[in-house]
Image (cartoon, rainbow, N blue to C red):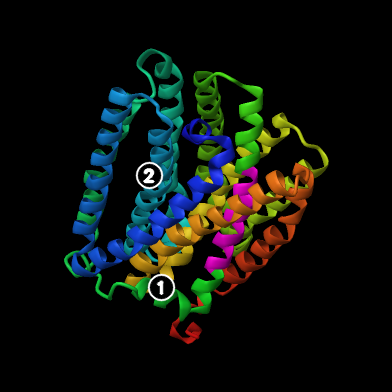
């Protein structure tokens, strides 16, 4: 909703702002990670973002939803949701090994989905009465509570890494990626999915904005979609994830999302419809959160500690949002300058989705061979 209020015709600038913010913050994060242990890193990052939420609550309450504040929140939110999720899964990949990850990452992800299940219900019931800004207080308090949960997990883990500094230097996360074929292939997955996902996101923003004029109604619609996604994702994470990993292999679990995106692109290119788009977006997000994301996190259980906290964070944040920014400008140029149809624009990114399928399958097949031998 903040993306719509910031200006549908200015989304490419918003995504560029997100990418620039990632470029600035990533070295700062990398430096911090070099100086502290993982418990301190989690504390500093999560508390910092919780304070940010309280600041935005004050700004919205004091100045309202001004376009400048909406754009700032859009950029901040896009940085925030990737950083905290990436750091959480870095800790999970650091604590559990590959076989444990295959067995329990789906169940761990159910916790996040239960939160996402309750969030839309609370939003739908309270947004009209209390307003959007007040919900940020709830988010901030929940974020602080999650820090104590992670400390409890770490306390029960017998790892010797608890008090060790992660080490490395300011740019070691980037150098780790450039020296590993394995990590570069994961980068290929993230870039391709970011580009294709951004095209679908832009379509959703445009079509929903054209169909629904009222801001509260749009927020309620997005909350209801989140509700459906959460219900289906709980079932997928709790039951299907382990079955797919066990019966088909991790390569098929990681490939599920790019395959579905390719199918969605073809379907929408030939049958453009808001109902179809929203339906496919729900299915795509269920596949992402229920199957692809837990499987992707398993991929990082076999890399070094420094790669888990630094290279992984760069892939999750800078690489992911860099793909978003690039896609947003390409989409804007095609639709606004070249005046091509939405169907034509979608078809142009179909090869990107298929490339993502190839990268995903290769990484899944090579997880057992991930050693120092994969260095370039």
Q: In the displayed structure, would residue 268 be above or below residue 21?
A: above
Q: Main secondary structure of the magenta part?
A: helix
Q: Quick check: 299 left or right of 334?
A: left
Q: In the displayed structure, would residue 197 be above or below residue 137?
A: below
Element marked by disc 2: helix
Give the class, few, some or many, for how many residues have Cα within 10 Å of label 1's Cα (few <14, many ≥20): some
Query: Which residue is found at the position 52% from the left and 75% from the top?
Result: 182
Element marked by disc 1: helix
Cα distance between the residues tagged 1 and 2: 23 Å
Q: Quick check: 111 left or right of 243?
A: left
Looking at the image, tell me whether mark 1 or mark 2 is earlier in sequence order: 2
Residue 300 within the segment the image draws in magenta: no
Res 244 seen here: no
Q: Which residue is mark 1?
A: 174
Q: Which residue is mark 2?
A: 76
Magenta stretch in the rendered image: 186-200
């Amino acid at each position: 909703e903040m993306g719509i209020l910031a200006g549908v015709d200015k989304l490419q600038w918003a995504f560029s702002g997100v990418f620039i913010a990632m470029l600035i913050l990533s070295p700062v994060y990398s430096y911090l990670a070099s100086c502290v242990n993982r418990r301190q890193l989690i504390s500093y990052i999560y508390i910092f973002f919780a304070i940010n939420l309280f600041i935005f609550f004050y700004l919205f309450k004091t100045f309202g939803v001004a376009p400048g504040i909406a754009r700032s929140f859009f950029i901040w939110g896009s940085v925030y949701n990737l950083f905290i999720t990436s750091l959480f899964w870095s800790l999970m990949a650091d604590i559990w090994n590959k076989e444990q990850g295959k067995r329990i990452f789906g169940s761990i992800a159910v916790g996040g989905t239960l939160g996402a299940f309750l969030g839309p219900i609370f939003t739908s019931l309270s947004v009209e009465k209390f307003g959007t800004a007040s919900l940020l207080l709830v988010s901030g308090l929940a974020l602080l509570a999650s820090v104590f949960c992670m400390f409890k997990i770490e306390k029960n883990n017998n790892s010797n890494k608890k008090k060790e500094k992660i080490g490395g230097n300011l740019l070691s996360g980037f150098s780790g990626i450039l020296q590993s074929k394995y990590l570069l292939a994961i980068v290929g997955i993230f870039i391709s999915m970011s580009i294709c996902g951004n095209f679908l996101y832009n379509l959703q923003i445009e079509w929903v904005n054209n169909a629904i004029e009222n801001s509260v109604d749009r927020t309620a619609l997005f909350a209801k979609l989140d509700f459906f996604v959460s219900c289906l994702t709980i079932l997928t994470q709790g039951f299907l994830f382990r079955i797919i990993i066990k019966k088909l292999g991790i390569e098929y679990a990681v490939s599920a999302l790019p395959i579905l995106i390719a199918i969605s692109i073809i379907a929408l290119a030939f049958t453009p419809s808001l109902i179809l788009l929203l339906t496919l977006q729900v299915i795509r997000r269920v596949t992402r959160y229920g199957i692809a994301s837990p499987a992707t996190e398993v991929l990082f259980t076999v890399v070094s500690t420094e790669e888990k906290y630094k290279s992984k964070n760069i892939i999750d944040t800078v690489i992911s949002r860099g793909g978003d920014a690039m896609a947003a400008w390409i989409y804007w140029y095609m639709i606004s300058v070249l005046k091509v149809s939405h169907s034509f624009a979608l078809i142009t990114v179909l090869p990107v989705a298929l490339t993502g399928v190839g990268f995903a399958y290769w990484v899944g097949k090579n997880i057992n061979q991930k050693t120092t031998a994969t260095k370039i």
